[in-house]
Image: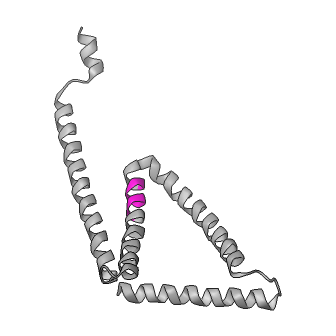
Amino acid sequence: MFEALLYEVTMIAAQVHESLMHLNDSFELAFDDKELHFLVMFGIGMMLFFMVHFVFKRLARWSITAISFIYVFTVMTVLGFAIEIGQRITGTGEMDFGDVISGLYGVLVFFLIYSAYRIVVFAVKHIVCRGRPSRKNRLDEV
């Protein structure tokens, strides 16, 4: 399933690349491949930045943990692909998309365990602090 999705995304990227090259030739813009990559990545990067900035500003109101998770998950995805590509280039292992997915499952399980721990600690603190008078009330007694 994931391999098919990755294949489809790759095919779409190839079609977009061909279309851009065709437009470049049709309008006689004379951009070389590196200049086109610069322009496309500039456009994608700016759009992605503003979308991510919008989402992260709203997430920051709730919890920095969500932003940390998204960042770590993104870095681990890139790292997983880099490891698999490195194995292919060096011949030290078999390049397998399933290995990337397994590694990301590991990240998700860790995050679920961490989240459960945080929920338990929060619940215990809430229960313990509910029985105590607030600090303001304790100062009034003095």
Measured as percent of width and height from the top left, residue 135 is found at: 27, 21
Q: Quarter of the image holding residue 38?
A: bottom right
Describe residue 66's horizontal placement relative to residue 118 as left or right: right
Nearest the eye: 77 or 12: 77
Colour mapping used in the image? one colour
Prevailing secondary structure of the magenta residues: helix
Image: 35 above or below 45: below
Nearest the eye: 88 or 7: 88
Nearest the eye: 65 or 79: 79
Describe residue 31's horizontal placement relative to residue 130 as left or right: right
Position of the C terminus, as image quadrant, is: top left
Q: Which residue: 22% across, 38% down?
A: 126
Magenta region: 67-73
Q: Which residue: 18% across, 26% down?
A: 132
Position of the N terminus, as image quadrant, is: bottom left
Measured as percent of width and height from the top left, residue 19 is found at: 67, 89
Furthest toward the right, the residue is 28
Tell me if I can see residue 53 in this picture: yes
Image: 98 above or below 134: below
Measured as percent of width and height from the top left, residue 131 is found at: 16, 30
Whether residue 28 is in magenta: the answer is no
Q: Which residue: 21% across, 57% down?
A: 113
Describe residue 112's horizontal placement relative to residue 35 as left or right: left
Measured as percent of width and height from the top left, residue 54 is found at: 55, 57
Tell me if I can see residue 63 in this picture: no
Nearest the eye: 56 or 111: 111
Q: Which residue: 70% across, 78% down?
A: 36
Image: 105 above or below 131: below
Image: 131 above or below 142: below
Describe residue 15's horizontal placement relative to residue 70 as left or right: right
Q: Quarter of the image holding residue 51?
A: bottom right
